[in-house]
Amino acid sequence: MSKGKVLMAMSGGIDSTIASLLLHEQGYEVIGITMKTWDYETSGGSKKETGCCSLDSINDARQLAVDCGFPHMILDIREEFGDFIIDNFVDEYIAGRTPNPCILCNTHIKWEALLKRADMLGCEFIATGHYAQVREENGRYVVSKGMDESKDQSYVLWGLSQSCLKRTIFPIGNYHKKDIKQMAIDRGYKELAQKSESYEICFIPDNDYRGFLKRRVEGLESKVKGGNFITKDGLIVGTHDGYPFYTIGQRKIGVSLGKDPTYVIGINAEENTVMVGRKEDLKELEMTVRNINLIKYNNITDGMRSITKVRYKHQGENAILSNEGDNIKVLFQNKVEGIAPGQSAVFYEGNDVVGGGFIRKR
């Protein structure tokens, strides 16, 4: 007897492949779907098309579905992706912030597109190959870390709504990566288990966001080149290539403040300045977070304690949260390095995601 009909997002990679197989073996009626978000040839990059939207990846996903005997389809969301994710990516850098397009895509594009198609196909659930877990507790759907903390992807899921989470399954969330690879080998997909993983932004396969911005915004380089590098005391110490081409924490920027390494510690788009300093200048005790989405609770009470992560691979730092209008003020127990406006701050209670938002200022 079927456990229900589920629309499974398939990239052709090992994680979504094994997730699909697990659902199929567990008795779900699986429909595979691969989302086409981007044409690599339009990116202008030098790297060949090998990512999640490549023809090879789509064919791999389709072949798995054929092998297992369940349907597979392609969902073209290039227009929505370009209009929202890519335009936002460019706009954020032009505003002097550092975006994370994967989070925005999950929140506003992928889940929405999957659920819409799931409704059309009569699917009760959608599923992805994320290393995360979701459960119902006290009337809410709570995201928690994947069992393999080295692969945990709960950080990129903070923006999902309760209505999205209610219908979401993460089939591999309670497995370690080594187990997933072994499952692939055991099921005859040894080549897939040995395939290297890609960590680039899907629409920047050569990992050169600066080149992408230059190609995307006509005349950008000439508009922003020649601004000043300044210290936190306002001293001009050189000229830069354009503020959008720098990120908080960046080194090797062509300017030195002495024998110690020099880092980007601030970006001012309006004045076309890039503030530089030493490593210690990157460390902050507090920050403000905007566009809050809460998952575990309906609200945050002043004084709530959390472990707060300020980037994907950040281990997190103990912090006290308080409300500041529509924003959340975060006071860390110890100074945190590399807080970048535009990146996401995610609040954890143990392994559970309390919620998150975008870093507004350091």
Image (spheres, helix red, strand yellow):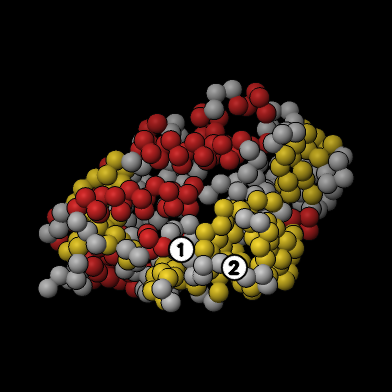
Residue at image x 61%, y 35%?
A: 94
Q: Which quadrant would residue 31 be assigned to in this image?
A: bottom left
Q: Nearer the viewer, mark 1 or mark 2?
A: 2
Q: Mark 2: which secondary structure?
A: loop
Q: Which amino acid does the dot numbered 2 rest on?
A: Ile
Percent x, y of residue 216: 51, 29
Count residues near mark 1 (Cα–Cα under 10 Å), then give few for <14, some for 14-19, many for 20+.
Answer: many
Circles 1 and 2 in contact, beta carbons < 8 Å:
no
Q: Which of the two residues, 358 or 255, is positioned nearer the viewer here?
A: 358
| Residue 230 showing in the rendered view | yes
Mark 2: few/some/many CA within 10 Å (<14, 14-19, 20+): some
Q: Is residue 317 depicted above or below 218 in this figure?
A: below
- What separation in Å lies between label 1 and label 2 (alpha carbons)? 23 Å
Q: Which mark is residue 34?
A: none
- The residue identified by callout 2 is 300
Which residue does the numbered mark 1 point to in the structure image? 153
Q: In the rendered view, tell whether residue 203 sits above or below residue 124.
A: above
Q: Where is residue 299 drawn, in percent x and y?
A: 56, 67
Is residue 49 visible from the viewing direction of this image?
Answer: no
**What residue is at 27 percent from the left and 70 percent from the top?**
183
- Place of residue 96 in the rendered image (x, y in percent of width and height, measured from the top left): 65, 40
Q: What residue sits 30% from the left and 71% below the top?
A: 182
Q: Nearer the viewer, residue 318 or 211?
A: 318
Instruction: Give the position of the C terminus as an image quadrant.
Output: bottom right
Name the residue: 62% across, 55% down: 326
Q: Which SS class for mark 1?
A: loop
Q: Position of residue 294 (x, y in %)?
A: 52, 63
Kind of residue sitting beneath label 1: Gln
Q: How many marks?
A: 2
